[in-house]
Image (spheres, rainbow, N blue to C red):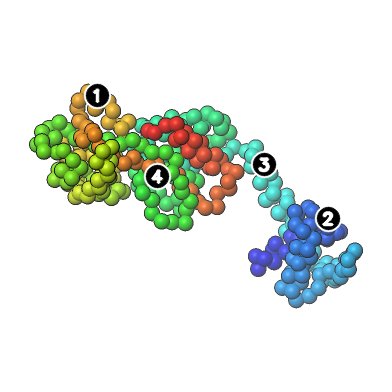
Amino acid sequence: MLGDVRHLLVFAKVVDKGSFRDAAEDLNLSVASVSLYISKLEKSLGFALLYRDTRKFSLTSDGEKIFTTAKEILSLYENEILDVSKHQQCRTTCIKVSIPAILINSPFMVRLTEYMKSFPHCTLTLLCSDNINDIVSEGIDVAFRVGDLEDSSLKARPVYAFQRVLVASPALLAQYPQVKTPCDLESIPWIGLTMRSNVRKFAHAKVGIETIRYEPRIQVDNVEAAYQFAKEGMGLATPPLFLAKADLENGSITSVLEDWEIDALKVYAVWPSNVNPCSAVYSLIHFMDMQSKTHLM
């Protein structure tokens, strides 16, 4: 059935142009493809539409009836659908973007602002939540997600990474003077994140890589909430460096195992697989990705 609609468009174009060759040029198809589409339509309908030889054709009586309908379909397609497509570049483009709340006060917002300034005809709807939005059902054009991704039919690619730091309150650290290596951290209370696994990987220039697993005493669904619990002495946390920088400088929070580097927190752009590569969505993804080449946040 859907194939017949395409074939009807080709049939209408052939009759309208009066030539298989002219129709093929207009449709950006080969003459052989146009002829094949007409033959498939005739086979599907069960009767001939055109009598033709190598140079000319004529409509059959049945073909004349079908052409009336086919011409209306072609007119609708060219006057409405193609018109929208042709003017898409001139119209204001609306993008619906989803981000986790942690990005609100991050360099991400600076990047996003730079993008909006570069594309004045773009309008933005920004959803800020640590809950994972359903991209398809909520009509989201692109979501920026932190951490590991689940397998899905959506497209995804990493665009940048946050430098993280392991922190604890001075009072909590005073209770665990034996902390020398990542393995020692497993006996200390942790603040866990519901959207992240309870695993952390540490790297040392001389020792190598160590991975630990822990059972969090408290679990939250928000990075900033986890950090606040850490500041209050309730456990270890690994916030982005930008979030903890001021507190590290004034001493209200302490960096733990400074010789060990914790794995960076990757941020992925996730979007529906049928988004047009020429769309504003791709330009936004590309813009954010290009920024990551010179900034590790």
135 above or below 47? above
Instruction: Kindly tell me whether residue 13 is visible in this rendering.
Output: no
Residue 143 in picture, x, y percent from top left: 44, 45
Secondary element under disc 1, as helix, strand or loop, is helix
* Circle 1 Cα neighbour tier, 10 Å, few/some/many (<14 / 14–19 / ≥20): few
The nearer-to-camera label among 2 and 1 is 1
Where residue 87 is drawn, which disc sits there?
Answer: 3
Where residue 249 is drawn, which disc sits there?
Answer: 1
Secondary element under disc 3, as helix, strand or loop, is loop
Q: Earlier in the sequence, mark 1 or mark 4?
A: 4
197 above or below 290? below
Q: Which residue is mark 2?
A: 22
Q: Earlier in the sequence, mark 4 or mark 2?
A: 2
Instruction: Kindly tell me whether residue 250 is visible in this rendering.
Output: yes
Residue 149 in picture, x, y percent from top left: 38, 51
Quadrant location, the N terminus: bottom right
Name the residue type under label 4.
Arg
Q: Which residue is mark 4?
A: 145
Q: Nearer the viewer, residue 204 or 92?
A: 204
Q: Are marks 1 and 4 in contact (CB under 8 Å)?
A: no
Q: Earlier in the sequence, mark 3 or mark 2?
A: 2
